[in-house]
């Protein structure tokens, strides 16, 4: 990221910023819209990010509601059960997302998963369109659960969707966190816990004691709210471990 | 001096902003896109619901009128077709009003720019798809025929007419509401003044404005939005 371009709603992306692709195609991400023939306008205030390898452009912004996109891993809460679907909520006050009762590992018509309202599932979005209901599944194309499915016990914490995205970025080859969040790594060296991050701004944590679970969750939510940098995160983790 | 702005004061809302000018303070909260009631549902676009709460008491016909004006402007700013069959809900709470006794019609006009700025900043904060950036301004015409941009309470109380205008970045007129006595010639000169003022809040090339030493000419809206955008991706620089 050499120089960061910030755009206001309705401003066009300068053509000098377009990535040069061999195929001559561009991929547009969130926050941008294409007005034929060749204008790309920002739809919100954000900083322009360019990926030259994938010839992709997108705007990064912090706040707002999570908008479902195909392939996103999310944490959904079952609201009620239908005849062949679970109706799950991804974000408050939005239409329910559908989770097929057979979209689980090893599920058949006779052995359906028994989810009650209020249960939490980790799943992947398979359909997201503005005209239809969002659909989820807890199974890979290969038929394996791959970590998806019901999340039992543990606690759910709410963070902003931008922070959840950073948590999910993983680490690069040298082991540095790409999203500049090190709380989970630092904690993982001292405490054993399970974690699942949903792109819709939800983090599920489970450990041997409630105290530890709450400690990790609180660290994550305050890191999000107060925009901690890596040093602050490390300090806070150290302090939390001492106080525990 | 530009107005005072607090970004994201409400944690639970999708987007929120507090806007304080010398006359009014308004806190705006935006939720959306959310599920819409069947009777308000629009098949091709998002419904916009604006709720205005006065600083004291419950809203009446005046608030309903202001709501309809604000939602009309926001409809042309938001890209409503991006989220069909949804609702974008905007709640505006007025927290400060002029203390001087003003004519009610003038007061309503004077409130419009603050209400619009607060709701625009909240909508931008909520990351909702927007077609353009907009800005609004208030102009009063004194008894002597002198035009005053962003008048103070006293100037407003003594004014012959008050005008609220809103323009987008391309200079298109989004809102024109006036109260009092004026002729078309006066309106035109007031409109030009307001267009210039609105363009100034989002103009590029801040160094130039700084060089003039005119504090009023600072493109505060652009600076505020750019600051927010930079804050959102500040973590990138540390890696």
Image (spheres, coloured by chain):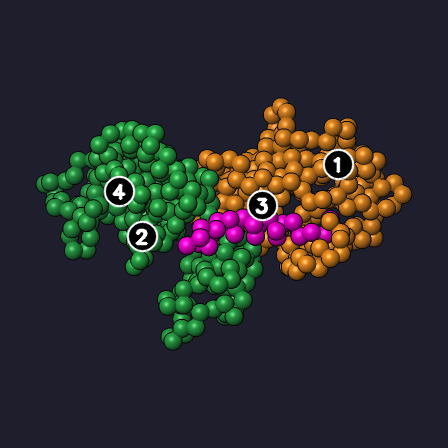
Name the mark nearer the viewer: 2 or 3: 2
Dot 1: within a 10 Å radius of its alpha carbon, few (fewer than 14), some, or many (20 or more) residues? many
Give the vertical position of B195 relative to B36 (above or below).
below
**Which hue is chain B drawn in?**
orange
Give the SS element for disc 4.
loop
Q: Separation of disc 3 and disc 4 at Cα?
A: 45 Å
Name the mark nearer the viewer: 1 or 3: 3
- The residue that mark 3 highlights is B120
N-terminal label among 1 and 3: 1
Give the SS element for disc 3.
helix
Q: Position of residue B20 (x, y in %)?
A: 65, 37
Q: Magenta residues?
A: B216-239
Majority secondary structure of magenta residues: helix
- The residue that mark 4 highlights is A189
- The residue that mark 1 highlights is B106
Which chain is home to disc 3? B
Q: Are marks 3 and 4 on the same chain?
A: no
Quadrant of the image occupied by residue A216: top left
Q: Is residue B234 magenta?
A: yes
- The residue that mark 2 highlights is A170
Foreground residue, A59 or B177? A59
**Which hue is chain A drawn in?**
green
Q: Separation of disc 1 and disc 2 at Cα?
A: 57 Å
Name the mark nearer the viewer: 1 or 4: 4
- Give the farthest residue toward the right: B144
Which chain is home to disc 1? B
């Amino acid at each position: 990221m050499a120089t960061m371009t910030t755009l206001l709603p309705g401003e066009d992306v300068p053509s000098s910023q377009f990535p040069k692709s061999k195929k001559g195609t561009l991929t547009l991400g969130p926050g941008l819209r294409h007005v034929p023939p060749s204008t790309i306008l920002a739809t919100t205030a954000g900083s322009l990010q360019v990926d030259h390898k994938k010839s992709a452009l997108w705007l990064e912004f912090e706040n707002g509601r999570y908008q479902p996109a195909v392939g996103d891993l999310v944490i959904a809460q079952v609201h009620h059960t239908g005849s062949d679907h679970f109706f799950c909520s991804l974000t408050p006050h939005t239409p329910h997302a559908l989770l097929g009762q057979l979209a689980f590992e090893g599920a058949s018509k006779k052995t359906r998963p028994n989810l009650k309202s209020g249960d939490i599932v980790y799943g992947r979005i398979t359909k997201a369109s503005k005209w239809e209901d969002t659909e989820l599944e807890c199974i890979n194309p290969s038929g394996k659960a791959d970590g998806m499915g019901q999340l039992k016990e543990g606690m759910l914490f709410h963070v902003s969707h931008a922070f959840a995205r950073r948590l999910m970025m993983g680490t690069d080859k040298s082991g540095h966190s790409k999203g500049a969040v090190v709380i989970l790594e630092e904690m993982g060296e001292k405490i054993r816990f399970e974690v699942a991050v949903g792109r819709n701004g939800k983090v599920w944590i489970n450990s041997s004691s409630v105290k530890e679970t709450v400690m990790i969750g609180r660290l994550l939510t305050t890191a999000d709210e107060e925009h901690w940098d890596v040093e602050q995160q490390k300090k806070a983790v150290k302090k939390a471990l001492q106080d525990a | 001096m530009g107005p005072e702005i607090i970004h994201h004061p409400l944690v639970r809302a999708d987007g929120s902003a507090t806007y304080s000018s010398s006359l009014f303070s308004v806190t705006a909260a935006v939720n959306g896109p959310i599920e819409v009631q069947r009777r308000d549902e629009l098949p091709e676009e998002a419904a916009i619901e604006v709720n205005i709460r006065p600083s004291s008491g419950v809203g009446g016909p005046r608030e309903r009128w202001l709501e309809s004006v604000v939602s009309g402007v926001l409809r042309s700013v938001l890209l409503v077709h991006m989220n069909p069959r949804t609702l974008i809900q905007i709640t505006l709470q007025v927290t400060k009003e002029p203390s001087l006794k003003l004519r009610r019609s003038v007061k309503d006009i004077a409130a419009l720019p603050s209400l619009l700025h607060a709701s625009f900043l909240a909508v931008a904060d909520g990351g909702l798809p927007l077609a353009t950036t907009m800005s609004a301004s208030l102009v009063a015409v004194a008894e002597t025929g002198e035009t005053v941009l962003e008048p103070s309470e006293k100037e407003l109380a003594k004014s012959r007419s008050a005008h609220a205008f809103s323009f987008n970045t391309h200079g298109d007129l989004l809102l024109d509401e006036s109260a009092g006595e004026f002729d078309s010639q006066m309106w035109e000169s007031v409109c030009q003044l307001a267009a210039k003022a609105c363009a100034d809040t989002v103009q590029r090339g801040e160094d130039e404005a700084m060089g003039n030493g005119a504090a009023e000419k600072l493109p505060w809206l652009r600076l505020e939005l750019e600051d927010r955008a930079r804050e959102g991706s500040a973590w990138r620089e540390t890696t």
